Structure formats: C-alpha cells, structure tokens
Amino acid sequence: MGEFVRVEADPENPAVAVIRIDRPKALNALNGQVTKEIAEAAAQVSTDDSVRAVVLYGGERAFVAGADIKEMADLSHAQMLNYSRALQNALTAVARIPKPVVAAISGFALGGGCELALCADFRVAGTKARLGQPEIQLGVIPGAGGTQRLPRLIGPAKAKDLTFSGRHVRAEEAERIGLVDRVVADEEVYSAAVALVAEYVEGPAIALAAAKEAIDRGLETDLDTGLEIERLQFSGLFATEDQKTGMRSFIEQGPGKAKFSGR
Ligand code: CAA
C-alpha cells in the first residue's frame, strides 16, 4: 500500500483488482513517488494469482493530469535521463501485466496520464473526460511512451495531430478515433470498466495471458516473428489444464460450457 497508489479488490468482483491512483491535490500528477508506486502495484497484480483482471482508476475528477511539471521543471538533462527511465519502466510494467487491464477514465487523462491509459488493453471514458498529449505546450514531447504507443493505437497522422497541437480531445472524438473503446455517463465509468474486464475473470488465465503477449509482442515485430511468437504461445497452452478441460468440454457438452481453473 503506497502513499498515493493502492491496490484494492473490487467489492463486488474480488478477482478484479483496482490500481487506485489518489493524489487529488495535483490531479494525480505522476511525481517520482507515484511513478514508483505504480510500478510496485503493477508487479503486485502481475504475480498475485487471485487477481484475474485489473482496473486503473484515478477517481472522479482526474485520471492523471500528466507527469509532475513542478517536479520536472528544473531537472537537468542528466537527471531527466534517469527520471524518464523510471517513468517509462513503470508504465511498461503496467503494459506487461499478463491479465486483462482497463483504464477507467474520468476527467483529465493528459500527457503521462494519457500514456498510462495507453498501457491498458481497453479504455472506458466518461462523457466529460479530456484526453491528450499537451507536452508540446511545455516545449517538450511525450516521454512516457506516447510517441510510440499512441501511433500504434490510432495511427501516425492522428497521433501527430494530437502531439503537434497538444489539444485536448473530448470523449466523443476519442471514441471516434479509437483512443477510447467506450464512452459512458461519468458516474458509470468505474462500474462500466469493472464490468468490461469482469467477464474474463472466469476465463482460462494462462490462455488470456498468452493472447495478450502474442498480440502485444507481435505488434512490436515483423509478421514472421509475430507468427512464431503465436505458434510457440499456442503450442505452450497444450501444457495447461485449461486446454484439456476446454477441449474435453467441447467434445462432451458442446461449445462455451467449460469451467476453467486458470491452471
Ligand atoms: N503537474 C503538476 N501539477 C499539476 C499538473 C501536472 N501535470 N496538472 C495539474 N496540476 C496541479 C495544478 O498545478 C494545481 O495545483 P495548485 O492547486 O497547487 O495550483 C492543481 O493540480 C489543480 O490543477 P488546476 O488548478 O490547473 O485545475 P484546472 O481544472 O484549472 O485545470 C488541467 C486542469 C487542464 C488538467 C491543468 O491542470 C493542466 O493543464 N495540467 C497540466 C496538463 C499537462 O500539461 N500534462 C502533461 C504534463 S508533461 C508530461 O506528462 C510529460 C510526459 O509525457 C512524461
């Protein structure tokens, strides 16, 4: 349990863990401490077998309003080399959580906040949410994965539009350009996000992790290498109990009836 980041089980779906970012005075801005605690939370939910899906949530006013500008303003080049490494490593730890992850975005998801949301598998936003990469207005560029993950998600031209202009995108446009997957009433953001991943908690956990790994690693490489990643992941699942259960259940009872153990 960190000062600004907590891992909690959702009360109604205890297999869904919530990484709750809670630094309200600074709209959850990512200072060094928050960054460190996000990395710790990602490690915790990654290795805890009772956690089957994850929600990233910052409360009602802001998801995360970016890296902490006040903390960064006077850093030297040498200091920023380390600072940005910690930031990128923390967000990559979130992107590598081997379980379904959704960002529940209420309010601002700007700069490092938008970049954190990009590390989730899915994004649910409230109607009043604002997303964007405003770093250019500070004389810099996104430094927590935005120049890489944003174009991979929405394509290079739209990513350049957002990055060159720094403009805030409303939820409706974010959905249209593929930056968010669902827009719901603001008061429903958290519950809609939980519902989205709760449907996977009874799923074959190792196969879900393999699907995520194959898609994410495959997007980072050429088709041949991606296909090889897929083939090895696919074959590896024949060492799991869930593959035996799933295929035997199909043969005996028809599709969609298997009860998986997650082993
Ligand atoms: N860093 C540090 N403090 C921040 C912050 C940030 N990114 N965003 C907000 N805050 C602080 C404000 O300074 C303010 O603190 P005080 O009350 O002590 O003055 C408090 O949070 C509330 O913010 P506002 O009064 O500004 O609230 P608002 O509703 O008027 O505006 C906002 C909200 C539009 C999000 C505005 O705060 C804002 O533009 N924030 C900065 C957004 C931004 O530029 N993010 C990118 C950061 S750089 C980055 O992330 C680099 C990277 O890629 C790694």
Image (cartoon, grey):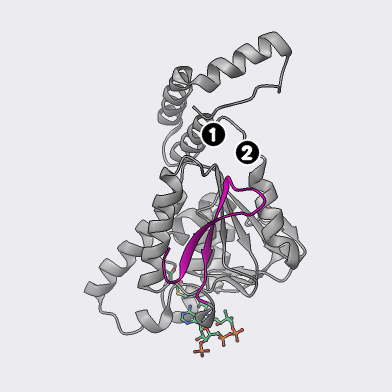
Q: Residue at left 57%, top 66%?
A: 161
In the image, is 144 to the left or to the right of 260? left
In the image, is 105 to the left or to the right of 78? right
Q: Amino acid at mark 1?
A: Leu
- Residue 143 in view here: no
Q: Is residue 138 above or below residue 21?
A: below
Q: From which residue to which does the magenta span run? A: 1-23
Q: Residue pushed farthest top?
A: 252
The answer to which quarter of the image holds residue 87 is bottom left
The answer to which quarter of the image holds residue 147 is bottom left
Q: In front: 241, or 74?
A: 241
Disc 1 versus disc 2: nearer the observer: 2
Residue tagged by mark 2?
A: 200
In the image, is 162 to the left or to the right of 38? right
Packing grade of label 1 (10 A; few <14, some 14-19, many >=20) is: some
The answer to whether residue 107 is magenta is no
Residue 120 location, x and y as percent? 54, 52
Q: Quadrant of the N terminus?
A: bottom left
Residue tagged by mark 1?
A: 208
The answer to which quarter of the image holds residue 132 is bottom right
Q: In front: 242, or 74?
A: 242
**Distance CA(mark 1)–CA(mark 2):** 8 Å
